[in-house]
Image (cartoon, coloured by chain):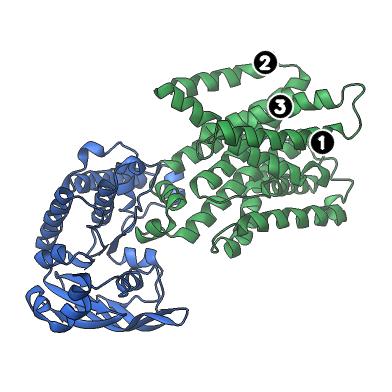
Chain colours: A blue, B green
Amino acid sequence: MILRANGLRRSFDGVFAVRDVDLDVAHGELRAVIGPNGAGKSTLFALIGGQLRADAGTVTYDGTRIDRLPPHRRAAAGIAVVFQGARVFTGMTVLENVMVGAHAGTRTGFGAAIARLPRHRREEREIRDRARESLARAGLEDWADRDAGALPLGQQRVVQVARALCGRPRLLLLDEPASGLRAGERARLADLLGELRGEGITMLLVEHDVAFVTRLADRVTVLDLGQVIAEGTPAQIRADDRVVAAYLGATA
Amino acid sequence: MKVLIAAAVVTLALPVFLDGKQLGIYVLAGLAAMVTVGLSLLMGQAGQISLGQASFYAIGAYTAGLLSVHGTAPVLGLLAAPVVAAAFAAVVGAGVLRLRGHYLAFATLAMQLILLSVLAQSTWAGGAIGLQGIPRLSVGGFELAEDIQYAYLVWAGLAVVLVVAHNLVRSRPGRGLRALATSEVAAAASGVPVGRYRLAVFTLSAAFAGLAGGIYAFYLGYLGPGSFPVLLSIEYVVMAVVGGLGTLAGGVVGAVAIVLLVQALNELATSPGMPSYAPSVLSYAVYGLLLVVVVLWLPRGIVPALRGKERT
C-alpha cells in the first residue's frame, strides 16, 4: 500500500466532517472518493494533503507516518496536490507556475541563488526543462508565457496538473479536477489522467461527478456523512443499494 | 537592459555635477533606496509588511558606529552592520512569521519603539544626545573623507543590494516567495516551506537596511535616536508602495521620488512666515495624500504603470 489512512477523524465545531475513515490505496491505483455534498470528501483530501490536521487517526505514506508533517514536507515525500479552486500563482507566467511545482525535490537555497553558484545554474536549467516537459504533456506549450491568472478556469486547472507533474510525484491528489470544465476539457483531462495511471502514478481522485469517475477509477470509495459506506470496483459501487440510496438517489 | 545601463551611467556621472547640499540628498536617496528595495521584496514577494524597517537601519548604524568608536577597523564595522541587523530580524521574525496576518507589522513597530527608548536611555549608545565621534570610513589606509566618495560608496552599496535582490527573484527560492505571496496553500503543497522562506526574506531585507545604516553612520559621523523615528519606517513603506511593490526598480524610483519630495516640502515648510509645526504637519499630510493618490490612480505603483504603458 502506498497510502494508508487509519481511523481518521476530524470535526468542526463539534460536527464530524470525517469520522473513523480507513482507506488503503495500492501502488499504481487510481482511487476515486465520491459522495454527496457535505460527505467529507474535501476534508479527507485536506487531511491527506496536510492542509488540515486530524483530530485522531493516522496517515501512512510509503510506510512512514505523515499525519504530523506540514504540507511542504509531504510534497518533498512525493505527494502532489491539485486543488479544486483556482490556485494558480497569479502574476507569474504559466511556465513559472509549473516551475514552482519542481520545488520539492530540488535544492537551491537563498545563498546559492544569490551567489549564482554553478549548481544553481545547473538546477535552474533542469527545472526549466522539466517544466516544459510537463507543459507539453498537459498541452499547454502555447500558453507558457501568459500570466497564469489570466487563463480561463479550465486551463488554470490544467496548469495545476502540470505543476503537480513537474514535481514528479508518486502520489497525486486531485480535488474535483473536472468541476467547472467544459465537456471537451473534461475528456482531455480524463485522457491525461489515464496516461498518468499508465505510468504508474498513484492517484486519489475526489469527485462529485460519478460518470467522470467510474470510467477512470480502479476502485471507488463512497463517503456519506463523514463515513465510508461502500468500497469496490465501479461496477460493484453502481450496484450497491446503500450507495444508490445515499448518493445516486439523492441526486436523481 | 538599455534603461538599466543608462540609469547606471547617469547616476555614476551625477555626483560630479552636484554641489554639497545636492550630494547630501544623493546620498540620502541612495540609502533610502537600499532600504526600500528590501522592503519592496518583503511586501511584494512575501506578502508581509514591516512597520519598523528604520529600526534595522538604526541597528546597522549603531553597530558600525559603536564598533568603530571603540577602535574596531571601520570597514569591519560596516561589514558587521548588515549581519547584526539580520540577526535581530531573525530573532523577531522567528516568532511572528509563523502566524498569519499582520503580526509582523505590529511586532516590527513595537520593536522600533522599544529600540528607540532603549537607545535614548543607554549611556553606552550615547543616550538621547547620541553617539559622537564616529571616524570616517577607511579601507586599507585610504580614508573616505569627501562627500562625493560617500556618494560612490552608496552607489556601490545600492548596486550590491540590487544584484542580490535580482539574483534572488529569478531563482528557485525567488519563485517560491512569489508563489507564497499569491497562494500560501498551493505554495506549501508544491514544497515551499512558507514560514522559513518568509523569515529568510525578512532577514535579507533587514540586512539591506543594516548595510545602508552602516554607510549612514560613517557618512554623518554622528547618530542619535532622533535620526530614526517611526515616521522614517512609514516613509519606507510609502516609498515601496509609490514605486511599485515587487519590482526592484520600483524601490529605487519610489525612494528617490519621496526623498526629492520631502526635500521640496522642507524648503517650503521652513521658508519665512511658516509656523514651526509646518514641517511635521506637511510631511504627514503629504504621505497621506500621496498614498491615496497612488492607490486611486496608480494602484500598482509608478514603475509597473510605466511598464504597462510601454507594452501597449
Q: Which mark is residue B281?
A: 1
Measure the alpha-carbon separation of dots 1 and 3: 14 Å
For the point 30% across and 75% down, the residue is A39
For the point 49% across and 24% down, the residue is B4
Residue B91 against residue A64 in the figure, above or below: above
Residue underneath mark 3: B261
Residue underneath mark 2: B16
Three-letter amino acid code at disc 3?
A: Leu
Task: Identify the element where label 2 is drawn.
Answer: helix
Residue extending furthest toward the top: B17
Measure the alpha-carbon separation of dots 3 and 2: 22 Å
Q: Find residue B176 and report its horizontal and vertical position in percent.
A: 41, 51
Protein chain holding label 3: B
Q: Find residue B280 and report its horizontal and vertical position in percent.
A: 82, 36
Q: Earlier in the sequence, mark 1 or mark 2?
A: 2
Q: Are marks 1 and 3 on the same chain?
A: yes
Instruction: Return the residue nearer the eye: A158 or B152.
Output: A158
Horizontal placement of A148 versus B285: left or right? Answer: left
From this viewpoint, is residue A63 visible? Answer: no
